[in-house]
Structure formats: C-alpha cells, structure tokens
Image (cartoon, rainbow, N blue to C red):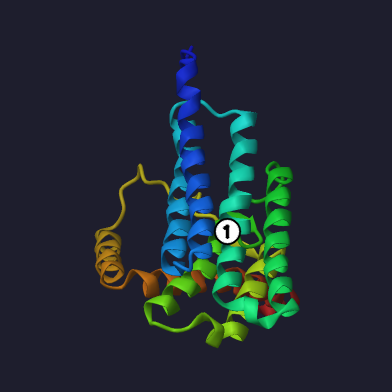
Amino acid sequence: MASKPHKAMYALPSAFTTAALFSGFFAIVQAMNLRFDTAAVAIFVSMVLDSLDGRVARLTNTQSDFGAEYDSLADMVSFGAAPALVIYEWSLRGLGRWGWLAAFVYVSGAALRLARFNTNLAVVDKGFFQGLPSPASAALVAGFVWVFEDLRYVGSDLAWPSWIITVYAGLSMVSNSPFWSGKSINFRKSVPFFVVVLITMAFVAFSADPPKWLFAMFVVYGLSGHLLWGWRRIRRRSPTLS
C-alpha cells in the first residue's frame, strides 16, 4: 500500500500554478507599460509552468479537486485575459468597438473552452482535445505579438491581421475540431535514432530565432485540428477513401 504524501507536498503543484498565474498577471502589467515583447514572453513562461503543475501532482500523488479548480482559474487569467489584453493594447485598441469585441470573443472562447474541458474529462478522447487548447491559443496570439515586435512593426499597422488571429484563436477554442493532445507519447520507451536527430535539429533552429519558430509551430498546430476535422468529414462522405 502506497504511503500517503506529506501534507506539505500538496502545496508543491499549487506553487507551480501560482507561478504560472503570476506570469500571466505580469504579462498584463507589462502590456500596460507598453513592453509587449516582455508580455508575450511572460505568457510563454506561464505555459511552461502550467505544463509542470499537473505532472508534479501526478509524480507526487498529490492530485486534488482544489488543485484542478485552482489550475483552471489560473489558466483563465494566463491564457484568457492576458493574451486578449496584450493584443488589444498592442494593436486592437485603434479599431474601436471592433477591437474590444475581438478581444471579448477571445476571452469568452477561453472561458467556454475551460468550462467544457472540466466537464468533459470523462467522455472526450484522451488522444485529442476537443477544440484548440487555451495555452496553444494563447501562444498563437502572444507569438504573433512577439514576432512582429521583434521585427520592429508597430502594432497599430497590423490591426486587422491582429483582429483575424484573435477571433480565429477564440473561435477555435470552442470548435469541435480534434487537436492532438500528445498524451500518447511514452517517454519511457526507446525512440528511433532519427527522432533524436530531429529533436536536436529542432532545438538548434529554435535557439537561432525563438519568436519565429514558436509562432510557426503554433500556427501549424492551430491549423492541424481543423484540417483533421475536414479530412475526417471527407472520409465519412467518401467510402472509397476509408
């Protein structure tokens, strides 16, 4: 019989969640101070921290209902409010009502996505997410800001492209498109040598230009679910392709 974790261990996953929440809040503060590249990086840092809290909870056997609820609320700040406010301050403000409506579409999409995720845990295919995950959606928006800040563009000059990507990310979160979850990967098994080579090359390319590579990666991921959804519909309609 496995021993019960010490009470202090239950605070460890929540510490990662708090750090992720802080990074999301920090992104909002930096956007208010017009430091948009720092704000975008803070959202990516929040993504990394958010990916760790659940793993730490499972490794230490300290999963709890409180931790799950806390993580969801922190995600709403870091991947809902923060990206919407960052891109609004950077680019959408000049569009007037169209700007804040796009930001609201994103925020409401994130809220609905998190609510659906929490209520569908027992029924959704573990291999795929239903709709674009909120961290990936945040990465799409924050990556767009980071790339064009790095290229020295003025946000107001990209108002309508910003509007399109914000609305796209918001609607993708509440779509029924299947996005690969990555949960099928088993790192305990050996992997082919060429996979190790590809991972090494990816790290080298990423280190050369992080903003562009991160944004490109999440653009591909942000399109993948819709393409897979379309392909599945085509296969259902065309028995010869099955």
Who is closer to the viewer here, 224 or 40?
Answer: 40
**Residue 199 percent coordinates (x, y):** 30, 62
When the figure is inspected, residue 46 is found, relative to residue 234, above or below; the finding is: above
**Residue 168 percent coordinates (x, y):** 65, 74
Quarter of the picture holding the C terminus: bottom right
At a point 69% along the width and 44% down the height, the residue shown is 118
At a point 44% along the width and 74% down the height, the residue shown is 216
Drawn side of residue 135 relative to residue 242, left or right:
left
Drawn side of residue 25 relative to residue 240, left or right:
left
Q: Which residue is mark 1?
A: 82
When the figure is inspected, residue 125 is found, relative to residue 235, above or below; the finding is: above
Drawn side of residue 233 relative to residue 142, left or right:
right
Residue 38 visible in image:
yes
**Residue 132 percent coordinates (x, y):** 62, 62
Amino acid identity at mark 1: Ala
Drawn side of residue 170 relative to residue 56, left or right:
right
At a point 50% along the width and 49% down the height, the residue shown is 183
Residue 242 visible in image:
no
Who is closer to the viewer here, 51 or 70?
Answer: 70
